Image (cartoon, grey):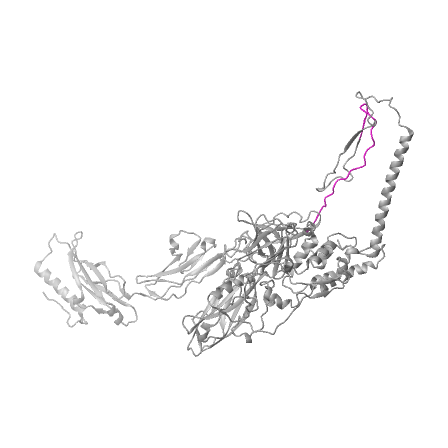
Amino acid sequence: MLRLTPTNGRCCCCLDLVLVLLLSTGCASGRGTTGDAAPDSPSVGGTLPHFLQEPEDAYIIKSNPIRLRCRAAPALQIFFKCNGEWVHQNQHMSQEYMDQDTGLKVREVMINVSRQQVEDFHGPEDYWCLCVAWSHLGTSKSRKATVRIAYLRKNFEQDPQGKEVPIKGMIVLHCRPPEGVPAAEVEWLKNEELVSSLGDDNIDTRADHNLIINEARLSDSANYTCLASNIVAKRRSATATVVVFVNGGWSLWTDWSPCSVDCGRGVQKRSRTCTNPAPLNGGAFCEGMSVQKSTCNALCPVDGGWEEWSEWTLCSAQCERQRWRECNAPAPRHRGKMCEGESHAMENCTGGMCTQNGKMLHDVKPQSDTESSNDVALYSGLAAGVIAVAVLIISVTLYRRSQSEYGVDVIDSSALAGGFQTFNFKTARQGNPLLLNSSMQPELTAGQTYSGPICFQDTLDKELFDPLPDMMVKVQSSFMVSLGVADRAEYHVKAHTEGYSATQGRKPNLLAPNGPLGPCKAQLRSSGVFGHLGGRLVMPNTGVSLLVSHGAIAEDTSWEMYMLINQGQSSAPSEERCEILLGPEVTYGPPGLSLSSPVAMTIAHCAEVSAENWNIQLKRQTKDNKWEEVMSVEDESTSCYCLLDPKSCHLLLDEPGSYALVGEPLNEHAGKRLKVAVFGSLEASSLNYSLRVYCVDDTPHAFQGVVSAESSRGGLLLEEPKTLLFKGNTYSLQVSIQDLPQFLWSIKPFTTCQEFSFCQVWSSNQQPLHCAFSLERFTTATTQLSCKISVRQVKGHEQILQVYTSVAEREKETLPFFMQADCTVTSQTGAKAFKIPLSIRQRICATFDTANAKGKDWQLLAQKLHIQRNLSYFAKQRSPSGVILSLWEAQHQAGGDLDSLASALEEISKIHSKSSAHSPSETEPDFNQ
């Protein structure tokens, strides 16, 4: 048998022809030797090779070769042809077997194709192979099978992008997978779970690999990832965060509240909340007002009045007569009182001369003429005596009025100017020891940042303000005369000796710094014992104080009163109403405290006060630790009083307990003040320096938390704290460092700008926020640091903190940030706790508490002191003028003089000087309106 074997790995160019000739010769030889085919053998004379299996397209993964197969019947021989060239016979693997069903010989051939073969092929098309099978009648060719190297690149051509869409909006996430062979298939993950497995008809994954959410729901807020995969690898895209937000919607208005007063012109209000729906996931807050107010006129109560008695009835058989009257003059209306007394009267009509059976006695002896004349003389004498006493009283009254037109009603403000003196001594300007370079900084005085007492001065300090404690002040004042003091009285001003709670034996601290950051240790509780003389209780460096007026505590009685500040998270603000805490949560006691007049509490706040932008409320904690609204600062109330200053709230309270001032923003223009400050200190490594920027609600108590934290870690204030107005417009707060010398200092990458979210800042509720910049100098020879710290609200206000400081090694040995100051005095009792001397206070109350026809009563005093609302609260007090003066004391506790009170009294004096010139018949102005 002739065997054809290609040599040297190459196929003869005429191999096809030779094989055909060979096969033809073989067939002829066979026929010549064997003759006709056996009848039992199958006939193959008219059959060409038929491929039972053709080679299939294949991909080479990494360096693994692939195997191509061909199977044909009937076939005498099968060879592979790749890229137009025959594959060497040695590279073929073949086997042959008989098909039991057809009786034909089946030949199967396989070859391996390596990665190197494919890479070495450089043709116009992909690497390909096909099979050629031979039979007695000819050849057959299979289909071409391509062989490609499989791969999948790492980077997506387009990553999906995060979106924020409103509820019920359409979401389209685009994804273009990485280039690959074979082409990658795309799936989507929702929070690491295949979207296709969720069975959600609302989510559609298209053939273009995009994901479409037809109608966004809250449940569609998730992290979405595009997943691309083929036979080589899987690739994940960047995660796209989809946030479905809900814009806030107003609820229905509540019913109008009852009128705030029982009589006359008042206010009623109704409210609505931004809860239909509530804003979610950064949705816009409702636009418009959450509270509507309207004036109302409450019908005043009309008490009932008796009509005239009816005529007596005729004397009855029982010797009695009767009469009646009705309560119709006027009839009681609008919650008015019923008439007091009896509506029916009955009496004996015979002077007691009536028998048991009702018959009158006619045989009684009549009264004599002498006895009648004696009765007339007696009654005449009594009448004359009464008339004489009345004439005497009228004469004395007219005489006294002729001597003093107004008596004790005369007002002269010189009493406040001459009754006591205020001494101010301004020392030479000193550098601020809180700052590293105080000589380069503007002066920081106690009154520039916070109003309210930082701490009381002790007796050592008092000598600076009262150099002449026994000075005799000459007073010539018509007001002093009217107050019962001699015309040229001597008002003896002496240092008060009443006690106060203080640590005895302290030495004066000459290094104690000035300014709002007074170096006092934070005190969470203050207490003192108070008696009939009253006094004042303060929490140092917090802007919180409590005033107990003179006479509020009964004589021979004393109370140990306390005041404390809650340092934890407050539950007073309502999250549903988007309320925030505007000042510290303050408690005073003890429970069961019994006072005859309200206490005056002062609480610092951080709101930018505006009735159009804020609904500010006072809340009180109930026994079950829930918070209830006591009043809105704009409302009328008889249970308490609230006077809101730009930086403090002054409260008149009757009931001990826990109180908090909360604010509900009515629109995006509502704002609160932030105090921003920068501190610095060396780190453990001498090359590292840390800058810490604090943003805290602008109240002394909140900033005191920063003071305590920095004091404990040795931090140094590098620039005067500044105030930043932060608006409720949902924009975040950014803190960045600028103008840092790059050739001297380095900073960690991506930390030059840091950000607080809006919710973090807006709902900080007196808790400080801070961020840190970690700097590193290249050499210890660098001893100066200069840069700027920018604190700004996006699309809002900005403050710049200029830092210029020394960072030498010796800084580790510098004095601590805050030195101990004399702030241990937390209470004062007696007259030294008040600005108005007791005698003058008593005479003012005596003058104004009594209504006068000329309008000179407590309402006029309140008007001149700019207290013009909620006057019904003072009307129910035992001494309205005394409560007004207590409120004035609380409001002006930080001031050093009594100018405003003196000016008010002077205006009242001028009014009455003018009115005294009018004739009695002229109409006097009515100040009660």
Find residue 509 and report its horizontal and vertical position in percent: 54, 68
Q: x, y percentage for residue 857?
A: 74, 54
Asked whether residue 840 appears in the rendered view, the answer is: yes
Q: Which image quadrant is residue 562 in?
A: bottom right
Identify the image quadrant of the N terminus. Answer: bottom left
Q: In the figure, is residue 354 to the left or right of 177?
A: right
Q: In which quarter of the image is residue 612?
A: bottom right
Magenta stretch bounds: 295-322
- Characterize the magenta stretch by its predominant secondary structure: loop
Q: Which of 879 and 70 is in front in this view?
A: 879
Q: Vertical placement of 310 versus 792: above or below?
A: above
- Left or right side of 575 for 469: right
Where 258 falls versus 757 (above or below)?
above
> Magenta segment: does it hold 270?
no
Percent across and percent down for residue 748 are 42, 71
Q: Which quarter of the figure has residue 143?
A: bottom left
Instruction: Note whether 711 is above or below 261 in the view shown.
Output: below
Tell how many labels: 0
Query: In this orientation, which residue lies closer to the viewer: 33 or 191?
Result: 191
Q: Which residue is drawn at 82% across and 54% down?
A: 400
Between 579 and 17, which is closer to the camera in this rendering?
Answer: 579
Residue 309 colored in magenta in the image: yes
Give the farthest residue toward the right: 369
The residue lying toward the viewer, choosing from 484 and 564, is 484
Res. 83 in view:
no
Residue 255 in the image, given as x and y percentages of width and height: 62, 47
Which residue in the rendered view is the most extreme toward the top?
357
